[in-house]
Every structure is written in structure tokens, then in C-alpha cells.
């Protein structure tokens, strides 16, 4: 594995700790900007990462580029390219695997522990067992046929899944480095305001929980990459 491609939807939601893990392994990460760049290099990469963003993967009428993005992700999966999907990327994987993606009953914005399934505990996600990670989503999805559920919360039954050995889908954010939270608070200011999120509390909880989450995320990504190498 020598080259990785990440499909990015907004500049401040990058690969974060995963990028650092890839750098340590000598794997170059190239960003392709959704809606702007030609996404065809994604199907020829050794690893595809599909990142988050503040839109719905089902909003194809509003964002026509999503049709091409979904077909690119589907082609990568069928080709056997290892794929990691985070938040919107997780929902994209659910969609290309023929599962329904839709608005959840309420948004999850903040730090929380995942409830891991037995399969989740035995997977690379075992690294986050008992560790609070960041939820930042309003949409959810049905578990795709043939997928294995790894994690859930009370609000969101499907928080992570695998589909075969080469697809990892994470609804939550383990990739956000502590230092980058302020970028998210700026970039998502409208959503945070309408959701009445206490920014002081978010900053305090980030300082409290992000260091352990960042360390766990590196263990998680390293273990998963070891499994697909």
C-alpha cells in the first residue's frame, strides 16, 4: 500500500489522525475535492477514504455531483479497494450497498461512548471501548445486507459497520485532532447555533476527551490497516 486518496467535502473536515497514521507508514494521501475534482483516481488508489460534510448523501437533486461520487465509491468497493468512510462517507457506503439513508430522529452533537457489539469488541474498534468519541451527525441509515454492525448508541443503532474485510464505515468521528476542533466550531457555526450547542461545554469536553480518543483512533486505524495490508 503506497498511495491513498481522500474524497473531501469541506476543507476543515480532513483525515486528521488517519492522515498521520498513513504518513507514519509511508503512505501518501491525496485529497480530491468533491464537486470540484475528477474523482476517477479514487478507483486506482491503494486506499480510499471518504470524509464527512454537512449535506445529506441522498440530496442528489441539490448536489448533482453526489451521483458521480456514489458511483466512484461503488466502483472502488467492487474492485476490492480498501475503503474507510467517516460520517457522510459512512452514509455513502451504506447507500452504495443498497441501504436506506435518512434523517435521524434527532441530531447527535457531542462526546459519547459507543456500545460495541461482540464483533465490534473483537475488531479494530476494540480500541475505543470505554473511550468517548465525537458524534456530529443528523442522518442515519439502515444496516446494509451482508454488513456486520460494530457499534451503536441509544439514538443511533448503526454507528459503525464492516462489509467484508476491506470496508470500514464509521458514523462518528475518531479522526478529529483536538487542535482542530475550533475549525469545526467556526465552519459549523449555523448548525451549532440552531441546535443550541453550548460552545464552552463543547470546548471543555474536547479538552477532556479528545486526547484519549485521538490515541485510540491511531490504534484503531493501525489495526485496520494491518488487516487489509
Image: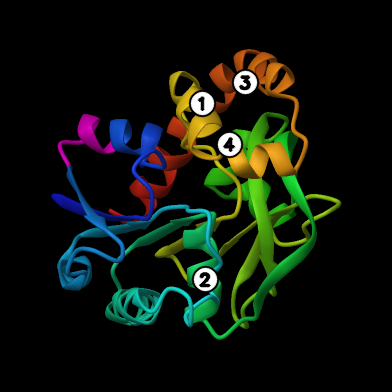
- Residue sitting at x 30%, y 81%: 75
Q: Is residue 49 left or right of residue 210?
A: left
Question: Pointer 3: what residue?
Answer: 206
Which of the 4 image quarters holds residue 188? top right
Question: Sequence order check: which comes first, mark 4 or mark 1?
Answer: 1
Q: Would you place residue 89 above or below residue 145 in this image?
A: above
Question: Sequence order check: which comes first, mark 3 or mark 2?
Answer: 2
Which of the 4 image quarters holds residue 79? bottom left
Discs 3, 2 touching: Cβ within 8 Å: no
Question: Sequence order check: which comes first, mark 1 or mark 2?
Answer: 2
Question: Which mark is in front, 4 or 1?
Answer: 4
Question: Sequence order check: which comes first, mark 2 or mark 4?
Answer: 2
Question: Pointer 4: what residue?
Answer: 189
Instruction: Measure how far apart labels 4 and 1 are at the Cα level.
Output: 12 Å
> Magenta region: which residues?
22-27
Discs 1, 2 touching: Cβ within 8 Å: no
Instruction: Measure how far apart labels 3 and 2 are at the Cα level.
Output: 27 Å
Q: Is residue 176 left or right of residue 109?
A: left
Any mark on residue 181, and which? Answer: 1
Q: How is the image coloured?
A: rainbow
Residue 1: tell me if it is visible.
no
Question: Sequence order check: which comes first, mark 4 or mark 3?
Answer: 4
Which is more toward the observer, 53 or 121? 53
Which is more toward the observer, 175 or 23? 175
Q: How far from the left and from the top, in percent, is residue 177?
A: 45, 26
Which is more toward the observer, 100 or 116? 100
- Residue sitting at x 59%, y 73%: 147
Question: Pointer 2: what residue?
Answer: 57
Give the class, few, some or many, for how many residues have Cα within 10 Å of label 3's Cα (few <14, many ≥20): many
- Residue sitting at x 74%, y 32%: 197
SS of the residue under disc 2: loop
Question: Sequence order check: which comes first, mark 1 or mark 3?
Answer: 1
Amino acid at each position: 500500500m503506497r498511495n491513498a486518496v481522500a474524497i473531501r467535502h469541506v476543507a476543515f473536515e480532513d483525515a486528521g489522525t488517519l492522515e498521520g497514521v498513513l504518513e507514519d507508514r509511508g503512505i501518501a494521501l491525496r485529497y480530491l475535492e468533491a464537486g470540484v475534482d475528477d474523482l476517477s483516481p479514487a478507483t486506482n488508489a491503494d486506499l480510499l477514504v471518504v470524509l464527512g460534510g454537512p449535506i445529506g448523501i441522498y440530496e442528489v437533486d441539490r448536489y448533482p455531483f453526489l451521483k458521480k461520487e456514489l458511483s466512484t465509491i461503488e466502483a472502488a468497493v467492487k474492485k476490492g479497494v480498501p475503503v474507510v468512510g467517516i460520517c457522510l462517507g459512512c452514509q455513502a457506503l451504506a447507500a452504495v450497498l443498497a441501504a436506506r439513508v435518512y434523517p435521524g430522529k434527532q441530531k447527535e452533537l457531542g462526546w459519547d461512548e459507543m456500545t460495541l457489539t461482540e464483533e465490534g469488541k473483537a475488531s479494530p474498534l476494540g480500541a475505543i471501548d470505554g473511550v468517548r468519541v465525537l458524534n456530529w451527525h443528523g442522518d442515519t441509515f439502515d444496516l446494509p445486507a451482508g454488513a456486520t454492525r460494530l457499534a451503536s448508541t441509544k439514538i443511533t443503532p448503526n454507528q459503525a459497520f464492516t462489509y467484508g474485510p476491506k470496508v470500514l464505515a464509521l458514523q462518528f468521528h475518531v479522526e478529529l485532532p483536538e487542535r482542530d476542533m475550533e475549525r469545526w466550531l467556526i465552519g459549523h457555526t449555523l448548525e451549532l447555533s440552531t441546535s443550541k450547542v453550548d460552545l464552552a461545554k463543547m470546548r471543555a469536553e474536547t479538552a477532556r476527551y479528545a486526547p484519549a480518543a485521538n490515541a485510540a483512533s491511531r490504534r484503531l486505524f493501525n489495526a485496520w490497516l494491518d488487516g487489509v495490508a
